[in-house]
Image (cartoon, rainbow, N blue to C red):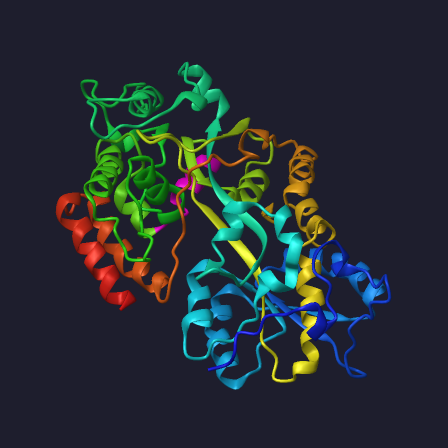
Amino acid sequence: MLSRRQFVTTATGIALGGGVLSACGGEEDPELAEGEVLRMRVWDEAAASAYRTALETFTADTGLEVEVEVLAWEDYWAQVPLDVAAETLPDVLWMNTANLAQLVDGEDQALLDAGALAGDEASGWEDAATELYRRDGTLWGVPQVFDRTVLLAHDELVTAAEGNPDELSFDPGADSDPLRELSRQLTVDGEDRHPGDEDFDAGSRSVIGFGAQPDRSAVLGPFIAGNGGAWQDDAENFVFGSEQGIAAVQYLADMATGHLAPDGTATAEDLGHCRSLFIDGTLALLQTGTYDLGPVLEDIDGGFGWSIHEAVAGPEGSRPLVHAIAAVAAEPEDEEREPAIGRLLAFLGTADGQRPLAQARVGIPAHRDLRSDWVDSWAEVGVDVEAVSELPNALAEPEQGVRSAEGTGAALPIIATVFTGEAEAAEAVPEAQQAALEAKG
């Protein structure tokens, strides 16, 4: 097993805190052998372009050149274990929480202590994004950007129904609630009849109320958490088959089978179905993530007015799910590269390192000083994100732990059968939890 090195100034010449990026006070810049460059890997071309802009300053200040490479998502995670085995990982690479544990807890532990490298820079990062990358007291990643759950509203349709997206809530234990009531008012068939009206024809719906669907990040996670449940516990075991989780899933599926949401078979087969309906002007309320803001803006292209709101609140309040992407540093075979790698990782934790990402609207910046840059960048294209620029105190969390992504992948097809009407949540959700636990191992 590779060692987990901690960097100190006497060993590496990297000063922690505010002086980490400057060569003042006699500190020498780290150097690479002639002709060598640092390698950084991401899975998004827009992010790569933004990084190249930011790194021009880094190179000018340090003399260290950085090559930013892009590997498509479908190939990214297959390549990582191959690189670990061959000791050919790039010096710095993007990481998500579902895959972090394999590189930290596995036999081939391959990462450097990011917290020691970044030092006091960590005080400027969003806590919710940072803590996702802390395991056993060690911070393994420098958060770069994060996405969060939001509710998108078709303004004209919601206003016509006299609804207020900011006042929506759900309660599986109640006979009705504001979300179901507004969804019923919004949903109309070809003859302007609503669900529950005599001769209502679901097949001719011209407007559908709410995008209830078996989407883990946008809907299932926030609704289960808002109802008092959780996807995983503190030991990273799957626990969504709780009483609260079962109730939340059945509530969402009932919206689909009750015609307040799109057909469950369609959403189970295509998680982009609700977004397509919203863009077409057919779905009035879409709960999704900030990752969808760009595609929605581009595809609606001014066709109708839409607005952004907090995720629908449950009995425990609004619980948006936060996904964070972090930069992690690979432990090099040549220890002489470590100071240069540390310098790059520390730079990526600064406002200067992340500002081009915020300006390019590549996720929400993890550095709190850049939140206004993110808000302003969206305002420039006519989108007001102010209502979701700050996170509530309590959140839903993404998958974490070894093989957690495989666990969720095993569970979702079983949960989808509740939305298609093939099963009841009381049976399917515990079965899905057991499948997730077995897949995780």
Residue at 43% x, 15% y is 160
> Could you say which quadrant of the image residue 408 lies in?
bottom left
Q: Is residue 356 above or below residue 305?
A: below
Q: Is residue 224 above or below residue 63?
A: above
Q: Is residue 165 left or right of residue 201?
A: right
Residue at 42% x, 66% y is 101
Q: Is residue 242 left or right of residue 78?
A: left
Q: Nearer the viewer, residue 116 or 83?
A: 116
Count of number-bearing discs: 0
Could you tell me residue 2's position as x and y percent?
Answer: 50, 81
Residue 424 visible in this rendered orientation of the protein: no
Could you tell me residue 317's position as x and y percent?
Answer: 37, 30
Q: Is residue 151 above or below residue 354?
A: above
Residue at 63% x, 70% y is 7
Residue 32 visible in this rendered orientation of the protein: yes
Confirm whether the magenta stretch covers residue 276: yes
Could you tell me residue 18's position as x and y percent?
Answer: 74, 54
Confirm whether the magenta stretch covers residue 217: no
Q: Is residue 39 left or right of residue 403?
A: right
Q: Which residues are magenta?
A: 270-280
> Could you say which quadrant of the image residue 248 lies in?
top left
Residue at 71% x, 50% y is 356
Could you tell me residue 76's position as x and y percent?
Answer: 51, 69
Q: Quadrant of the C terminus?
A: bottom left
Magenta stretch: dominant SS?
Answer: helix
